[in-house]
Image (tube, helix red, strand yellow):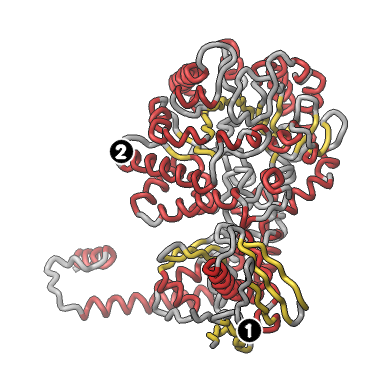
């Protein structure tokens, strides 16, 4: 193919099978038929060709570039780069859990191990540390273990953080990630009254959920989750003030999920869930050890993802439901809106430290929750401080923090820097450390890369269909995601509204 | 036999040879090796193509990075003659694409740096956003000369429209084409008379 370099501005491209995808650093994209791509590359687009204007406007031709507009587009697309500190703070108030999940994503311990509960003094110092970080928006997410096993500390942190936010005039978002097995009406009322949003795990129908997530407390976990989701939904819908606190649910894909794509979506429909988030399982922590029993290849996950997305789109097109798929929504927000939806994994540099921090029950600070899981397996690689004694600047300046930023900047990755999905994607150092013993990773061999490129392939191919595009655009309009430029809220994990 | 990939850089054109076959492959039991000229192919494209082969092969590079590099590809899934040939072809294709990608990247480096710099300044409030960078002047801000020029242009356009309307031969018994102002003027004239 003849190439005339002179008229070409900086861009990456990908052959998509009969057409080409072009993207550039400024967040613009174009989908060209092969013949059009060849004309573009050869510099033989005529002045009358309507493609010329499109490519000019999107910054693909260097003889006519609007530098100011492209710089503005870049700023909007990477709004997270201009913020001075993390917005998402994950507090692990206990490692105890009353479920024994197959993938045990959070590296938990037996319910009897109260020595892994965060005490009030550590909780106070952790909140103080969180408020010493400079981001004007603070989102505290309670994680575990099962956070409701240490309810007094959850309650204390909610009240103390609200008081601190009021005193310091900061925006505070609170979110509880719970399996709901220990939820009570009193706890629910307290959480509603204090503007804490709810998020849980729902892997699918009982036979799947209970297999993935066995419950130690007697009875079936799935029925408890479903009952509380129904109750919370009802309460939110009946009360105008609570309608923004509709509970969210996350599904984790194991290889057992592959047998239930429609049943999983149908359950989310039955529960009137606004979104379903089809998430891959990461072979991190305990999940790494049991990967042969529950894991799968990245290609298998992408095929499953497409099956799920196809079903969701079909329901939308037939008018049977307006349910949205969260991963697609995150990607589409970047692709079609040109803004960052606040999803920590798909950023360059990644969200670790700059976007989020995780706090263990003993005050130890990690670059992310995945980093904490690695620590739980005996490797302190991703520990960057302790909230009881260190300053925010110590954490930011920690050699591990610097290495995380460098390793996850896509322009430093030989393959990523040339990838058409660079404007939308991210590299996860903890994942690659666990898989390849390198925080930088080797992208040609990375399941992370295969699965994310696969998902972007699926979404871009579907965008070519006008009916799919119509559905996608309607999702963007309805999106309840709390992101705003310079005000990122983590998508998916939290659905909290401004609380103070 | 060589194909030629024409790459034109800023003020001159250069012709970079893209070999159909990368010299003569020397298949052995386990791997395939060949030499690549660095001046002809560029160091970055060779390294880039080697990196991209890592999912399929173990790649060994040796030689003088300014002159000639020996590439050895050892397939991960067991070496057969067909697989070695496939690897060689895949490397050739990757190398050709890498040359294009690197040529585009190098040619645009100053522009990328400039826009990135503008983005940093913009994000830090050091320069105004694009929409406010060159605001449209409001009418109050026009000087007399500009105002006279605009009035002259408006008058010209109005005359042009009038003459176009007059030249149209479509019947208009109810005077639909006349503007509101024209109708009012006609009414006033009618009243006076």
Mark 1 Cα shell of 10 Å, populated few (<14), some (14-19), many (≥20): few
- Compared across the picture, whether A384 is left or right of A202 comes to right
Q: Position of residue A483 (x, y in %)?
A: 57, 41
At 60% from the left edge and 37% from the top edge, which residue is drawn?
A: A291
| Residue A152: quadrant of the picture | top right
In this view, the residue in front, A55 or A408, is A408
Please tell me whether residue A393 is drawn above or below residue B6 in the rendered image: above
Residue identified by numbered label 2:
A319
At 52% from the left edge and 29% from the top edge, which residue is drawn?
A: A248
- Compared across the picture, whether B72 is left or right of B167 comes to right
Q: Position of residue A318 (x, y in %)?
A: 29, 40
Looking at the image, how many numbered discs can be counted on the residues? 2
Find residue A499 and name its label: none
Please tell me whether residue A65 is drawn above or below residue A248 in the rendered image: below
Find residue B10 and name its label: 1
Q: Chain of mark 1?
A: B
Q: Which secondary structure, mark 1? A: loop
In this view, the residue in front, A302 or A392, is A302
Mark 2 Cα shell of 10 Å, populated few (<14), some (14-19), many (≥20): few
At 43% from the left edge and 63% from the top edge, which residue is drawn?
A: A17
Q: Chain of mark 2?
A: A
Q: Position of residue A176 (x, y in %)?
A: 61, 25
Q: Are marks 1 and 2 on the same chain?
A: no
Q: Is residue A9 visible?
A: no
Q: Is residue B160 visible?
A: yes
Q: Which secondary structure, mark 2? A: loop
Q: In the rendered image, which quarter contains the C terminus of chain A? A: top right
Q: Position of residue B33 (x, y in %)?
A: 65, 74
Asked if the residue under mark 2 is in contact with the one under mark 1, i.e. CB atoms within 8 Å, the reply is no
Please tell me whether residue A302 is drawn above or below residue A197 in the rendered image: below
In this view, the residue in front, A239 or A450, is A450
- The CA span between labels 1 and 2 is 54 Å
């Amino acid at each position: 193919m003849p190439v005339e370099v002179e008229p070409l501005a900086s861009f990456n491209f990908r052959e998509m099978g009969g057409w080409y995808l072009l993207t550039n650093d400024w967040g613009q994209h174009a989908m060209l038929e092969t013949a059009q791509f060849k004309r573009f590359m050869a510099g033989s687009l005529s002045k009358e060709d309507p493609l010329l204007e499109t490519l000019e406007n999107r910054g693909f031709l260097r003889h006519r570039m609007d530098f100011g507009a492209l710089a503005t587009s870049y700023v909007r697309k990477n709004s997270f780069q201009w913020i001075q500190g993390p917005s998402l703070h994950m507090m692990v108030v206990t490692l105890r859990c009353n479920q024994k999940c197959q993938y045990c994503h959070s590296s938990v311990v037996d319910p009897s191990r109260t020595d892994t509960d965060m005490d009030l003094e550590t909780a106070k110092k952790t909140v103080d540390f969180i408020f010493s970080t400079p981001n004007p928006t603070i989102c505290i997410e309670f994680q575990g273990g099962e956070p409701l096993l240490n309810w007094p500390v959850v309650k204390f942190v909610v009240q103390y953080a609200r008081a601190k936010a009021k005193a310091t005039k900061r925006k505070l978002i609170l979110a509880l990630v719970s399996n709901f097995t220990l939820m009570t009406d009193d706890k629910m009322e307290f959480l509603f009254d204090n503007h804490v949003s709810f998020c849980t795990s729902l892997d699918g129908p009982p036979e799947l959920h209970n297999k993935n997530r066995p419950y130690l407390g007697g009875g079936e976990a799935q029925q408890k989750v479903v009952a509380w989701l129904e109750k919370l939904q009802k309460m939110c819908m009946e009360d105008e003030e609570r309608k923004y606190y509709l509970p969210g649910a996350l599904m984790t894909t194991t290889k057992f999920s592959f047998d239930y794509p429609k049943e999983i979506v149908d359950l989310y429909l039955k529960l009137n869930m606004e979104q379903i988030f089809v998430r891959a399982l990461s072979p991190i922590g305990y999940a790494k050890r049991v990967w042969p029993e529950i894991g799968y290849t990245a290609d298998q996950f992408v095929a499953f993802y497409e099956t799920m997305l196809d079903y969701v789109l079909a329901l939308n097109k037939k008018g049977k439901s307006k349910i949205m798929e969260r991963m697609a929504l995150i990607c589409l927000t970047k692709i079609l809106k040109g803004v960052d939806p606040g999803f920590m994994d798909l950023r360059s540099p990644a969200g670790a430290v700059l976007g989020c921090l995780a706090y263990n029950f003993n005050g130890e600070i990690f670059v992310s929750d995945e980093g904490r899981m690695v620590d739980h397996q005996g490797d302190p690689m991703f520990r960057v401080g302790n909230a009881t004694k260190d300053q925010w600047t110590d954490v930011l300046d920690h050699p591990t923090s610097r290495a995380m930023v460098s390793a996850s900047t896509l322009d430093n990755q030989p393959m990523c820097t040339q990838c058409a999905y660079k404007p939308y994607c991210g590299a996860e150092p903890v994942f690659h450390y666990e898989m390849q013993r390198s925080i930088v990773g080797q992208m040609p061999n990375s399941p992370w890369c295969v699965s994310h490129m696969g998902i972007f392939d699926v979404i871009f191919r579907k965008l070519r269909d006008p009916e799919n595009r119509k559905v996608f655009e309607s999702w963007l309009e309805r999106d309840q995601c709390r992101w705003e430029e310079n005000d990122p809220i983590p998508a998916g994990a939290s659905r909290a509204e401004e609380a103070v | 036999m060589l194909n030629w990939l024409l790459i034109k850089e800023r003020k001159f054109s250069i012709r970079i040879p893209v070999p159909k076959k990368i010299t003569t492959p020397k298949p052995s039991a386990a791997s395939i090796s060949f030499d690549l000229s660095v001046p002809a192919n560029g160091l970055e494209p060779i390294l880039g193509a080697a990196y991209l082969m890592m999912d399929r092969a173990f790649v060994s590079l040796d030689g003088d990075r300014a002159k000639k590099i020996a590439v050895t590809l050892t397939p991960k899934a067991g070496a057969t003659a067909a697989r070695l040939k496939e690897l060689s072809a895949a490397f050739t294709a990757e190398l050709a694409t890498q040359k294009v990608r690197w040529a585009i990247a190098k040619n645009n480096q100053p522009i990328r740096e400039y826009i990135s710099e503008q983005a940093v300044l913009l994000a830090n409030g050091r320069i105004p956003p694009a929409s406010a960078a060159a605001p449209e002047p409001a009418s109050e801000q026009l000087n007399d000369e500009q105002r006279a020029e605009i009035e002259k242009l408006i008058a010209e356009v109005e005359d042009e429209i009038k003459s176009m309307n007059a030249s149209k031969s479509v019947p208009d018994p109810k005077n639909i084409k006349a503007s509101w102002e024209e109708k009012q003027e006609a009414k006033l004239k009618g009243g006076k008379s």
